[in-house]
Image (spheres, helix red, strand yellow):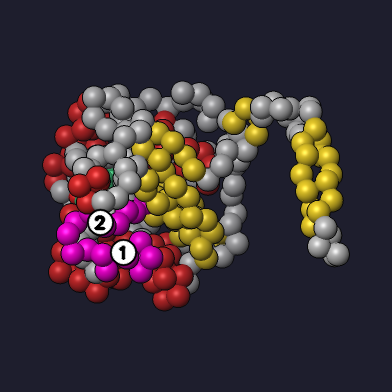
Amino acid sequence: MKDTFNTDEQEVLPVELLENRILEGDCLYWLKRFPPNIIDLAIASPPYGLLRDYLSEYQNNGFNFEGTAPEVFRVLKPGGVLVWIVNDSVLVPGMGKSARPEREILYFVEDVGFNYHDRMICEKNGSSFPSIKHKRFGQVSELMIIFTKGKIKCFNPIKDHTIKYRDSYGRSTKRQRDNTLKEYKWKISTNEMGLRTNIWRYETGGLGKSSKDLSAHDHPAIFAEKMAADHIKAWSNRGDIVLDFLSGSGTTCCQAKKYGRRYIGIEISTKYAADSRKRIDGTAIVENDDDE
Ligand SMILES: C[S@@+](CC[C@H](N)C(=O)[O-])C[C@H]1O[C@@H](n2cnc3c(N)ncnc32)[C@H](O)[C@@H]1O
C-alpha cells in the first residue's frame, strides 16, 4: 500500500493509521503528523552520503537533522529510547574537522533534551576502507548511541556471554588509605551466562551476511539484521511500537514485525519504500524473542 494519505499540512494522524506501515516521503513531514508520546523505541542511521557534512549543512541535503531530532523526541514515549547509529568520515581527505557524531550527540543532549544513556560500539567483521593508505588502523567500528527521553522504561538484558571461570574465585587488589594494595578474593558468578558488553560484533556485508534476504542488498547501507533484532529485544517489549524514520531497506521494521512489535518506517525513496514493504510481507512472526 502506498502511504500517501490526503492530509492537510497540519493534520495529526491517529496511531492506528500509522502503525505497521512504511510511510513514503520526508521523515520530518511525516513525524510532524504523529501524535506525541506514541513510540517506544526509535532506531535510525542517517544517510551515508551526508558523512561529509557539518551539522548546519544538513538541510541542504534533504535530511533536516536539526528539525527532525526534536520531532523524534516529541513522538517518543517518556522513558523511550533512540538508538542512533552513526559513523564519521575521517578517511575522506580534508574531513579531520567533521566530528559529526560528537556534534550530533551534543545537539541531541543540549538542544533537544535527550539523556545520553550509553555509547555502544558495533564491530563489523572486516574493514571496508583502505585505511593503511590513510595511516589509520582498520576501520571496523560504528557508534550506536543510546539516548533516552527521561528515565529509561525498558531494558531486557542480553546474556549470551559464557562465564569462563564460573563458580571459582577471582583475585583483585584494592588500594588502601595508606596507599598500600590489599588483595581480596571474590566469587565469580554462579550463572552460566553473563551480561553482554556494550561492544556488539556482527558479520556484515553482502553475500547474505547482513541479511540472508539477498534482495535487501539492493540498498547500499543496510543494518545487520541481528543488530537491529538485538536492539529491539533489549529496549522494547512485544506489542511496543518501533520506529525507523530513515528506514531504507526496512531492516528495523522487518525485525520488529518478526519479534512481535508494531513498526513504523519512513523512507524518502519510492524504490526502497516499495522494496521494504515486500521484504516485510515476506517476514514471518516468531513466538519468542529467543527464537531465531
Ligand atoms: C543509512 S540508510 C538506512 C538504511 C537502513 N537502516 C537499512 O537497514 O536498510 C538511510 C536512508 O535514509 C533515507 N533518507 C534520506 N533522507 C531522508 C528523509 N529526509 N526522509 C526519509 N528518509 C530519508 C535514504 O533514502 C536511505 O535509504
For residue 197, what is the image quadrant?
Answer: top right
In reply to whether residue 93 is colored magenta, the answer given is yes
- Binning the other alpha carbons within 10 Å of mark 2 as few (below 14), some (14 to 19) or many (20 upward) gives some
Q: CA distance from mark 1 to mark 2?
A: 8 Å
What x and y, as percent, mark residue 223?
A: 32, 40
- Magenta region, mostly helix, strand or loop? loop
The residue closer to the viewer here, 171 or 48, is 171
- The label on residue 138 is none
What x and y, as percent, mark residue 16?
A: 39, 49
Report the quarter where the N terminus lies.
top left
**Residue segment shown in magenta:** 85-104
Q: Is residue 40 left or right of residue 169?
A: left
Mark 1–mark 2 CB contact (< 8 Å): yes
- Dot 1 or dot 2, earlier in sequence: 2
Question: Residue flagged by tag 2: what amino acid is it?
Answer: Ser
Find numbered disc 1 in the image and state the secondary structure of the residue it sits on.
Answer: helix
Question: Residue flagged by tag 1: what amino acid is it?
Answer: Arg
- Binning the other alpha carbons within 10 Å of mark 1 as few (below 14), some (14 to 19) or many (20 upward) gives many
What x and y, as percent, mark residue 121?
A: 44, 47
Residue topped by disc 2: 89
State whether residue 183 is above or below residue 113: above
For residue 163, what is the image quadrant?
Answer: top right
State whether residue 22 is above or below residue 275: below
The residue closer to the viewer here, 101 or 23, is 101
What x and y, as percent, mark residue 87?
A: 32, 53
Find numbered disc 2 in the image and state the secondary structure of the residue it sits on.
Answer: loop
Q: Is residue 147 visible?
A: yes
**Residue at the location (40% across, 34% down)?**
202
Numbered marks: total: 2
Q: Is residue 141 left or right of residue 250?
A: right
- The label on residue 100 is 1
State whether residue 224 is above or below residue 75: above
